[in-house]
Amino acid sequence: MDNGGTETNHGGGFASFDIFDTVLTRRVADPRSAFLLLGRRLHSAGKIECSAHAFAKAREEAEVRTFRNSGGLDSSVSLKDIYCELANALHWSVKKRSELYVEELQLESELLVGLADGQRRVRQARARGQRIVYVSDMYLPSDYLEQRLRENDLFLLGDTLIVSNEREASKASGRLWPLVLSEIGAEPTDVHHIGNDARSDGKTARKSGLSTLVLEANNPNRYESMLERHRDSTDGLSSALAGASRLARLDSTNDADPALVDVAAGVVAPFVIGNLLWTLEVAQKENLAELFFVARDGQLLCDVARILAPKVGYAGKITYVYGSRQAWTLGGLTEIDVERLTSVIPDTGDVAMTLRDAFARLGVAPEEISLPLARAGFHRATWGRQLVHDQPLQLRALICEDPDISRAVRDRAKTSRELVLAYLESVGAVTDNKIGFVDLGTGATLFNSLGAILGSVGQEPPLGFYFGLRSKIADAGYGLPLTYVRNEDERLGFLRTPGLLTMVELACTADHGSVIGYDDVDGVVVPRFDEHGNDPVVEWGLPVVRDTVCRVADELLLSPDLIGSIGIDLRPAILDVFKLFWNSPTTNEARVWGAYPFEDGWGDQSYRHPIARARGLFDAVRPQPYRHWWEQGSSQLSGPVTRKAFESRSRAIDVLKKVRKRLPVESS
């Protein structure tokens, strides 16, 4: 963001750069988080007696006291001075003080990385013939900073480095700028300064006559700041996640809309990574030989799992499996009974279901069984009409009771099951090893179908990893999947997360169409895809989302002595950043993510719709148009009067919910 100036393009003169968060940055979003990581390292090595959190607090307070006692920012305070104060507070010997001082410098070196944008700007300035000057408000020694710059190809012979503590003057107060101009022998108009702080790199520099460019986007955004707030409760993991998010969005190599990248890095990536760290932790504890990620939700998860697995030490195989409810549910009907048929013919479906739709899911054409259907009152003229009232239940009962219909369904189920088994065997899922299957569902339909299919050849059901389980999900004999977000029947987890499943489903999809079955091609079973594919989502920006999330995972710092993931609950941090986005989107975020072409339904009955769009005033009294709908995004895209109407409706609904909770329950 350009606040207070534009980058000069003329040759000659001086190009001045701030260092931290301009050309170099840490792998954590807040510098204070480095103190917690250092505390973890020192504690695990037995070098400090207090906890990592106590050390971090003491280190932070020692810095504040040192500057206060020395007269503020315009002083000669160095890291050594801070460690003298810290040693006094924690009763260290001189030897220990020197040793831990070196430890902090070493950690800084490990955390610092170059920013691609900053490196590009320095190269461009050199190409214009400008001399390079680095100016930093910092307590670290200049020779240390110069070495870090050299390691990132940022400091060459002839460059100048000026550090505040060695001049007893700071950019923040403005006293450093005249000293900079004097040292390099330049007039203010000869120098263009670039930094990330609105005051130190902008206001005070301009007051001294320099032109400036303030890169406020280099500072933690609202999602990264929210993750940072959970630093203590996550032992620094959320801070590392915030740092990785910032690196991914700042070093994005595409020209995508910032709203697409920012939300992918700050909202989607934390959920995906948090979910997978939990999955990999359980997989290690359960000694799972392989994790299978089921299409289409699993494509992004699988890609990210392959990045994270080496970081957390999971050595099992990671495989992407082409599967779906449509491809597996029929094969999972090892028994034909009313309860099992509910997964195919529910009382309330994803979309309006006709009799023809229901039998299409079972692989049977109504024409094959027209006589028994007619005897039950389902005449040919009714096959295309929506099933209403208790008709789904009647149809399930008829399938079980009529021998001709049940025989046709069993035959199709057997054929389907054989194809699914052949495919699963080809990818290594038919095995005696302990394995896990990862899905983002809430109904366990796919899990139960898989358990039945593998059980038909004597294989134990796999361990399932799910987003959550909605209420009234019974154990069908294969156990129940483990849940990351919630288990409604057991009242566990985060039961009220409006919009989260919609967000997860739209972000965690694949670049291919739905898997609708399998074909035997010359003895090789291959998946068959929906002919419509997933091009609308790809064109919307799915590759950018996937690349950004993978980049966050790649940048995430995980180290046993600094940041671990075992036993850490990231969900509160993840949900806070999600709610920040979902409930308070910017207009640009609502425009970009609201335009997502969401696919709902099953098979040929599926359809696409945006999840948000501008609404009219009268829409405030109408129900939302789709079950996956983003009301807050729509409100943000609407006019101010309509927005107020939606806000009033939302408050009224909240009040009504509270009143209903307080009403006494009548006994029957």
Image: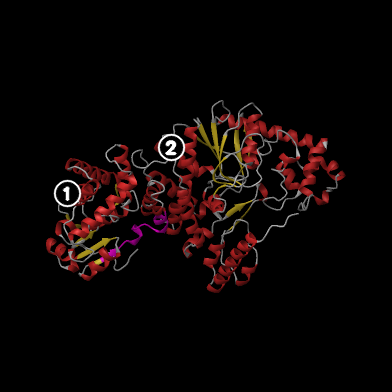
**How many numbered marks have been drawn onto this rendered protein structure?**
2
**What's the residue at 50%, 57% (across, down)?**
579
Amino acid on which the number 2 mark rests in the picture = Ala
Q: Is residue 8 visible?
A: no
Residue 48 x, y percent position in the rendering: 28, 41
**Does the magenta segment cover residue 216?**
yes
Q: What residue does disc 2 label?
A: 309
| Residue range corresponding to the magenta coloring | 212-226
Indicate the secondary structure of the residue bearing disc 2.
helix
**Does the magenta segment cover residue 47?**
no
Residue 567 x, y percent position in the rendering: 44, 40
Q: Is residue 573 visible?
A: yes
> Residue 447, labelled with which disc?
none
Q: What residue does disc 1 label?
A: 143
Indicate the secondary structure of the residue bearing disc 1.
helix
Give whichever of 49, 462 is nearer the camera.
49
Amino acid on which the number 1 mark rests in the picture = Asp
Residue 42 x, y percent position in the rendering: 29, 40
